[in-house]
């Protein structure tokens, strides 16, 4: 009824009593949109993506109970690789692995552990192309929002190979970079780092096989964009660090001053 009325206004000839949608002022359009949303929400009440409970006013994508369950990654951590440390009395301190060999990146931070409620949301995004989970992910990101980079810094999402990008239709790391730093969208470099080799999924590969899989997989197509700058490299999940290490190495070789890694989730070790 609503839509037929709306279409009628657009499709019938103009007379003195009709208002074309294109001529409605912004206030009228806003009222109409609110009204339509109210009817839509009445017919299809928004529900939590994780537990399906109906959402209270203001909640977007995820209910407050599920949001509370989001397993934030907190100190003590290794300040370089971001690994959780068990000795809470000492605070943040370098892990044995970073003491033995310093990684190419200056730091890695994950916001939550890779488990419910984040894991099924990310799975829906990546493997079912369901971008409607983004408001729920945004609510989770807000819990552990990282410091906003300066305007001189550059944000680079870990790229997909063009074949994977065509398959999926979007790069989830780019969507997350936009969620992390909505006020720094102009600092996001979408195409500067490119994945030039189609690699097999890292799942199931051991350390050496992962490194071989990622070898020569990336290139910086415009070194001038990264030269001397701090780069915030964004990915969805940190597993073993092989991918972000290789990206960092390539960026530093191209002249980046420093690479700091930020992921939404991190697999527990
Ligand atoms: Zn819920
Ligand atoms: Zn470490």
Image (tube, rainbow, N blue to C red):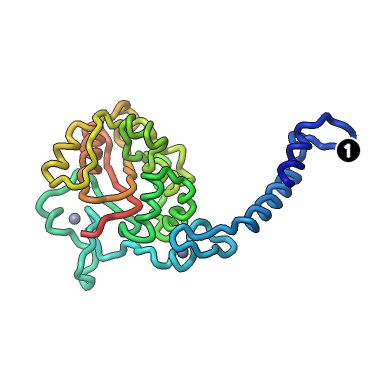
Q: Residue furthest bottom?
A: 89
Q: Measured from the top left, where is residue 52 in percent x and y? A: 48, 62
| Mark 1 CB near ligand 1 (8 Å cut) | no
Q: Is residue 34 left or right of residue 19?
A: left
Q: Position of residue 245 (x, y in %)?
A: 21, 43
* Crowding near the residue tagged with mark 1, few <14, some 14–19, many ≥20 C-alpha atoms within 10 Å: few
Residue 181: x and y, percent?
44, 47
Count of number-bearing discs:
1
Depicted 76 relative to depicted 174: above or below: below
Name the residue rendered at 26%, 28% in the picture: 196
Farthest residue toward the right? Answer: 16
Residue at x-position 24% and y-position 48%: 106
Q: In which quarter of the image is ligand 2?
A: bottom left
Residue at image location 42% in from the left, 38% down from the top: 187
* SS for callout 1: loop
Q: Where is residue 74 in the image (x, y as percent from the top left)?
A: 31, 64
Asked whether 5 or 113 is in front, the reply is 5
Asked if residue 54 shows in the view, the reply is yes
> Which residue carries the number 1 mark?
17
Where is residue 20, by image quadrant?
Answer: top right
Res 150 seen here: no
């Amino acid at each position: 009824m609503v839509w037929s009325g709306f279409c009628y206004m657009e499709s019938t000839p103009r007379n003195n009593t009709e208002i074309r949608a294109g001529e409605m002022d912004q206030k009228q359009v806003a009222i109409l949109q609110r009204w339509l949303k109210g009817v839509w929400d009445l017919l299809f009440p928004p529900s939590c993506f994780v537990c399906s409970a109906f959402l209270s006013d203001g909640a977007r994508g995820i209910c407050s109970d599920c949001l509370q369950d989001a397993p934030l990654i907190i100190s003590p951590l290794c300040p370089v690789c971001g690994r959780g440390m068990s000795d809470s009395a000492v605070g943040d301190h370098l892990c044995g692995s970073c003491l033995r060999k310093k990684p190419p990146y200056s730091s890695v931070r994950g916001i939550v552990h890779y488990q419910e409620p984040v894991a099924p949301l990310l799975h829906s995004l990546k493997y079912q192309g369901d971008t409607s989970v983004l408001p729920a992910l945004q609510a989770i990101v807000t819990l552990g929002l990282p410091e906003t980079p300066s305007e001189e810094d550059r944000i680079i999402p870990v790229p997909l190979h063009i074949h994977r990008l065509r398959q999926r239709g979007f790069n989830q790391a780019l969507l997350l970079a936009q969620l992390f730093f909505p006020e720094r969208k102009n600092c996001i470099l979408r195409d500067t780092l490119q994945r030039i080799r189609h690699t097999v999924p890292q799942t199931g590969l051991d350390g050496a096989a992962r490194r071989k899989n990622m070898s020569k997989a990336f290139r910086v197509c415009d070194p001038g964009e990264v030269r001397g700058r701090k780069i915030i490299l964004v990915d969805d999940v940190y597993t073993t660090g092989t991918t972000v290490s290789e990206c960092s190495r390539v960026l530093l070789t191209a002249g980046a001053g420093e690479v700091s890694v930020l992921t939404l989730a991190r697999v527990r070790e």
